[in-house]
Image: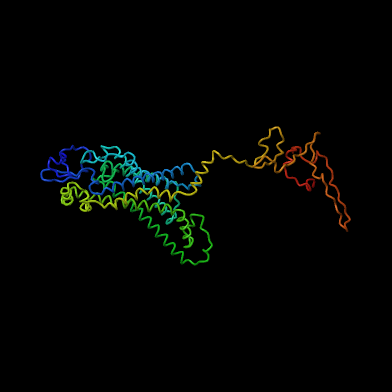
Amino acid sequence: MSLGDLRGCPPPFLDDSLYTDNGFVNGRLCREMGNLTCCLPCPMADWVYPDSFDTTSAAANWISAISALCCLLLLLSWAFLPVEKTNRHYLSICLTVAVILMNLGFVIPLAAQPEQCYDDITPHSMHTNRLCGASGSFLMLGGWAGVMWAFLRSLSLHLQICWQVLVGRNFMIFAQAAGWGIPIIGLTLALVFSGVSFRFSATCHINHQNSLADFWIPLLIFAGLTVIITFATFGYCIKVYLASLSDNSASTEGSSLPHYQSSVQSLSPRQAYRRVRRVISLQWRGIAIVLIIITDVIFFSIIFVFQDSIVVSAREDASVAQEWAACLALSGGDKNQCLDQASGLVVNEATVSAVLMLLALNGIWLFFLLGRWAMVTGWIDLAKRPFSKSKKEFVSVDARLDGTKDIGSYEMLDKESSAVLTPISPAAKSPESGRRTPDYFSQSARYHAPARSFSSPRPPPQRSPSTDLPESWAPSTIANREINPLGMNRL
């Protein structure tokens, strides 16, 4: 029999006077029983959920670990593979980093297996357990960053489709400042004014105090703006599509899109539809992942706020949990007999499990939507690169000849062998002093006189070599120049 039983608290409840005020005292679930204050043993989730809830939480943590590995593989592919294999973009990279931070909030408890309770009735907080502070901080920072980068991606797409704004360097600087600055500020405010503690799983969550003002409401505002902007973009796309159906102008059937920003305003409905369709075809993966992440965050926020409010109401109003507490006392602490009464105090197990699973799957969705088959071939090519022989290219023999040889003679080599493809005879050099014109008439063709012709072929007049060409022309230059043999002696 425990000390709590000796002091008068019915099992499984324990007398809080036997314990110190360390740990997260506000996380205790206590009620007055006569002259005593009896508290539910920690952790509370073990008493309001069946034993299968622990298995579901562990499964969600393992899925989060797989999700983190998928995000890590994406980041490595974007870092080491060429851009033509990955089509990387800073909006996709930052969103993936945000998701991997959120997954770390579930991976840390899986790896470290932290103790959730400071004592028998008090849960740990970030001040008494460092792992609690780390997991809660990663979860909130990842959630904030995921919402912000989803918002920025949706805003970028909206500006391109609806307002024909070409987002560039200025938007990138603004996105980096807002995408990481606002989450860091939000995390700081949440840790200072609320803090985190073990609530209903092995991952620490934000406490109830001031949580609506410093975390949930700002987070839901940006999530709501993302939803509004996304549906506004969809509405514009539908409007453009309907307008293109009624555009029967023959002049726009085969016309191409304008190439200048100044002419975008004069688009016909059919041209505008083709432009929107092109952007959607390139960005549909990003649109899908934005909708998935925003849906998960909104779902998690609503469920957790509702859960938090129920627990706080049960802590402040003893009548809310009176029936359930009486059942536990009468059953001698058998929670399985009182799960029906406990269902009114917490969100049901199926809903909480669905929230945890959806959050854990975000990285896997990213991997399938932002990953490409070209990444696989890129990694294969990268692995084969140290073992592959570099192919020879078309090179000139001059690259391997000494500088003393005549630069006017060159040969082209085959890329697979050193066989000569197109040998070109160098210009003949006379051992005597002076320069001579190359003999292009060494093989003269036979002349067939026409039947009624009274003329005969005449050889070209012979000129002295010194007067044929300027003295500045070198023999190698003559060989390299393209000379017309029939007109070289024309006056």
Does any portion of residue 220 appear in the rendered image? Answer: no
**Drawn side of residue 17 relative to residue 451, left or right:** left
Residue at 10%, 45% in the rendered image: 34
Q: In the depicted view, which residue is nearer to us: 410 or 390? A: 390
Furthest residue toward left: 35
**Drawn side of residue 69 relative to residue 311, left or right:** right
**Drawn side of residue 191 relative to residue 262, left or right:** left
Residue at 76%, 37% in the rendered image: 471
Horizontal and vertical percent position of residue 202: 29, 43
Q: In the depicted view, which residue is nearer to us: 237 or 52? A: 52
Horizontal and vertical percent position of residue 238: 42, 61
Does any portion of residue 5 appear in the rendered image? Answer: yes
Which corner quadrant holds the N terminus?
top left
**Drawn side of residue 80 relative to residue 135, left or right:** right
Q: Quadrant of residue 117?
A: top left
Horizontal and vertical percent position of residue 263: 49, 57
